[in-house]
Structures are given as C-alpha cells and as structure tokens.
Image: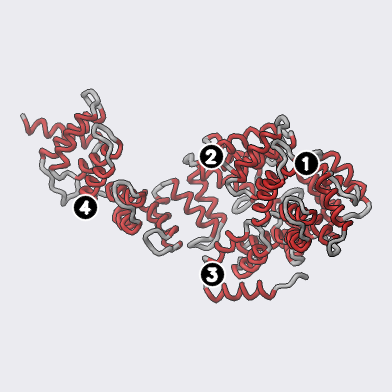
Amino acid sequence: MKNIIKAALVALVLSTGLAAPLAAEQLVDADAVANYARGVMYRDGLGVAQDYAEAAKWIRKAAEQGFADAQYDLGLMSAKGWGVPQDDSEAVKWWRMAAEQGKADAQYVLGVMYREGRGVAQDYVEAASWFRKAADQGNASAQHNLGYTYQEGQGVAQDYAEAVRWYRKAAEQGLASSQVNLGNMYRDGQGVPQDYVEAARWFRKAAEQGDAGAQTNLGNIYGDGQGVPQDYTEAVRWHRKAAEQGDAKAQYNLGLKYSKGQGVAQDHGEAAKWYRMAADQGDAFAQHNLGSMYKRGQGVAQDDAEAVKLFRMAAEQGDALAQNNLGRMYLDGRGVPQDDAVAVKWIRKAAEKGEAQAQHNLGIMYAIGRSVAQDYVEAARWFRKAADQGHADAQRFLDLIPDGAAVAKELFRMFVEQGKAAAGPFEDGQAAFRRGDYSTAVRLWRPLADQGNDRAQFNLGVMYGTGRGVAQDYAEAQRWLRKAVAQGNAEAQNNLGLMYNNGQGVPQDYAEAVKWYRKAAEQGYARAQHNLGLMYYNGLGVPQDFVQAHMWFNLAASQGYRDAPKLLDAVAGVMTPAKLAEAEKLAREWRPK
C-alpha cells in the first residue's frame, strides 16, 4: 500500500507539471519524491486544504533527502515567508544545494541574490558565475541577466557584443525584457551596427506581449520616424497603451503629443492630465511642463504656487529648465516670497548645466549687481555662453556692455525689474511671451517680422510651429523660418532642420535636415552642433561617422549644451583610440564659419 501511495503521488506531480522532469543522472529516493509531492499538494491545495506550514514540513523532508526540486521550492518559501519565517540566508542555503546539483532555476535565483546582496554579501563576480551556469542550460531569465552584466560591466569586463549575444538567446525564447534590451542595443548601435529597422522589430515583439517599456520605445520610434515611416497617430497609439499601464515616460510623451497636436487634436487639458500622471510618479520632464502650464494657465487654472511646487520637484532632480524657471519665480516673487538669493542659486545651477536662458538671466544679474556683486566681466562671460547657443537677447546685451557704462546698467535694470527693455516692441513681445500672453507676443513681433527683423521672423516661425498665440500651421512656420534663414539666423536654420528631420509640414528628409543643421552648426550654434552630431551618430541623412559625431558632440558640450556630454561618452565607447584622437583633433582645430 505504501508503494502504491508513493506511485500515485509521483504520478500526480508529474501529470500536473509541478515538478521538473528528473535528469537521467539524478537518482532520488522514492521517499523524497513522495514527501515532495505531499508538500506540493498542501502548498497548492490539491485535494487538501491549502496549508503552507504543512507544505513546508513535507518539502523540507524531501529537501533534506537531497531532492533538488524540493530544495529549490524550500528556498522560495524561505524567501517569501510561506509557511516558514522569511529568511533570505535560509533561502540562499537551499538554493545553493539545488544549484550545485545543476538545477537551472536555482542557479538563476542564486545569481540574483549575489547581485542584490540578499542573504549573502553582494558579489557581482559570483552573480555572473551563477547566471552563466543557468544561461548555459537555456534559462532565459539567466541569459537576460548575463547580458545585462556584460552591458554594465558588473562582475565581468564590459562587452556590448557579448551582451547582445545573451540578450538575443533570451529574446528568441520570447522573453520581453530581453527583446526590449536587444532593441535598445540596435537603436543605440551598441555591440551591433546601428539598425533602427531591427530595433523596431524587437520593440514590436515585446510591445505585442504588453511590455510597457517596449510600447513606449515603439511610440518613440514612430514619432521620430526611425526604422518605420514617421506616424504620429501610431506613436500616440503605442504611447497610450503604455501610459494606461502606468508607464511614466509614456504618460509624459502622450502629454507632449496632446500639447503639440501631433497625432491627436491639440488639447492642453488632456496634455495636463497625462503630465500630471507622469509628474506624480516623479518624472522631471512632466513636472516641469506641468509647472509651465500652471504658470501660464494653459489647460489648467493659473496657479503660481502650484507652478513653483512642480518646478521645485523637477529642479531637485536636476532638470535645468525647471531650475531656471524656479529661479525666475523667486526673482519675480510669483508663488513664493521674492528672494534674490534663492533666485540666483537656482538660476546658477541651470546656467552651469548649459541652459541658455539661465546663462542669459545670470548675465543680467551680474550686470546690474542683483543678489551678486556687480561684475561686467562675469556678466559678459555668461552672456557669451548664452549667445554662443544662439540666444539673441544675450548677444544684444553682450554688445551693450561698454566697460561699466551707466546706460547699460540702466537698460539691464529696466529689463529685469520692469519686465521690459528700452529697445522697443521686440523686447515687449519677449516679456509677453514669458508671462504666457502669446497672442500679444505675436501681435508685437509680426510688424517687426514684416519689416525684416530676423529675430522676430524666427520667433513667429516658432509660434506657428507650436501653435502658441496662433493656430498651429507648419507651412506658415516654415515660411517665417525661411525668411530668417535668408538672413543667416542660426536658430532658424536649426529649426528648419528640425522640421525636415521630423517631417513637420514637409516630407521627412534627413539629408535636408543635415544641410540646415550644418549651416547653423558652422556658425557655432550649440544646439545645431548637437543635432548634427546625432545625424552622424545615427547615420541619418549622412553615412554613419562616429568621428564626425564625436567632433560635433564635443563642440556642443564645450559650450555647455546639456545633452551633449552623455552622447559624447556613448560614441566614445564604440570608437578605437585612433579614431577618438582624430575626432578630438578635429574639434580642437574647428573654427566657426
């Protein structure tokens, strides 16, 4: 009778798939199998009332008899606190026993414990060793984690090609997280030649499994037209899928699409809704954009205090735009008591990160001696940084500094303290823009643009492109940008490049985008240098050329353009020392045209 019961219990385990099939060389006492089967029945409530304590008792008997499946399960119960006290060290003990018998699942989780330092001292080398053992047996999760260790250089020498190899093994088994990472490697050209089509293919596989990160990435791919025809409607569809799963990046991107009217009707209220969801999850970009909407009363009731709160959240995460805007709120006493010292603290943080408007604002503060010792040399230094990024007002003010002349000081004081400059309607338009009165800004700039003022023409182009103060109209945006371009305005050249890059009002044409980015970059405009570097890095409109990409990123970074240093590091990571030296030499020798 005893043997009949054992046989029945073993048949139950095998028929329900609760235990992995035994390897041919794994000899296990029949009592151990029977004990394990009883434990499984209590654990899963099969024919008996579910009882984790009783399950643990029987599974422990089997584990102590050397049955690897029982050792693995007892480790899991110890880690979860099911029927036994929660104890990571105990979990590690049992998983190690199973792992040393060759059980892949145990080898994988033991690697996780070493990587995270749970139940054992953190040890990336040991983690990689156990991941490899499981990966070699085909465990997809271990293959994914081994790929990650190679990508990050944790416990092994960093090796993107090896990372790709392991991600691919797991991805081909259908593991969504590996499909996402493999798509990222193709998108970024890490360990494989950059290939947006292949990136989109892997993102789609994971996205169709419901992976929110993949859905977000696929939405970005459609929004940028990389590897697929640009399609804002399709971008919105995928962003919405991820956003509805709670993905903060997707919620931010969906808010951005509603704000710009890309793929959906422009709707600032809907934009604010999605920004709020992302902001509540800590997304700094969403916090900043939502803060700007509260400051302007766009899509939400105007509320300076709420704007300050959101700007502060993003600023404390290091977002330069938010730091500058928070500084301005303190400078103007909007939503907070007026405080010059706090204002200059935040504006300086943003300026040091390369934010052009903050550099311009800091220049003003030094020029008039507001909250800092008056210092025209320091003012000129910050105006130069902003002007080199194409900030038109900074260039104008730079020209006004006549070795400490009182007239310059008075102009700066009027600009900051009265909210307008003595120079006329262009600056009045700037002041209207800053307070969110876009229709007034357009009204003031249009006559100047008609008279040939290239800065007003550029600004009108931006307003039509973003639908601020006028109905969004890409054709009209392009018309005004071309007028400014004809006068050599670098900002307009860059923005015209962006329109061709994104297919806004014109057929998408990367070669044409490169042409306009180059014109602005060759004038020393940092944003265009960054954009041109991206085109070379991604091989869009030009043959892929890491030397040229590095040179342009280097030039943009040297001016403080905030996104350039990260990209500079990324491209350097795929270059040989000889190519890196060549790129650095080109950057040193480069001069504006």
Disc number at residue 140?
none
Three-letter residue code for mark 4: Glu
Q: Is residue 579 above or below residue 251?
A: below
Quote the CA–CA distance across marks 4 and 3.
41 Å
Residue named by callout 1? 467
Disc number at residue 247?
2
Q: How is the image coloured?
A: secondary structure
Q: Which of 218 and 464 lies nearest the eye of the viewer?
A: 464
Residue named by callout 3? 575
How far across and down, in percent of the image, does residue 461 sit?
A: 81, 49
Question: Nearer the N terminus, badge 1 or badge 2?
Answer: 2
Residue at image point 69% right, 37% down: 336
How far across and down, in percent of the image, does residue 466 sit?
A: 76, 44
89 horizontally vs 521: left or right: left
Quote the CA–CA distance across marks 3 and 1.
42 Å
Residue named by callout 4? 100
Q: Residues within 10 Å of mark 4 (few under 14, many from 20)?
A: some
Question: Nearer the N terminus, badge 4 or badge 1?
Answer: 4
Q: Quadrant of the C terminus?
A: bottom right
Question: Nearer the N terminus, badge 4 or badge 3?
Answer: 4
Quote the CA–CA distance across marks 4 and 1.
64 Å
Farthest left residue in view: 1
Occupied quadrant, residue 131: bottom left
Question: Nearer the N terminus, badge 3 or badge 1?
Answer: 1
Farthest front residue in view: 373
Q: Which of 235 and 382 lies nearest the eye of the viewer?
A: 382
Q: Which of 319 and 417 lies nearest the eye of the viewer?
A: 417
Three-letter residue code for mark 3: Met
Considering the numbered disc 3 on the image, is that residue within a helix, a strand or a loop?
Answer: loop
Quote the CA–CA distance across marks 1 and 2.
27 Å
Q: Is residue 432 above or below residue 367?
A: above
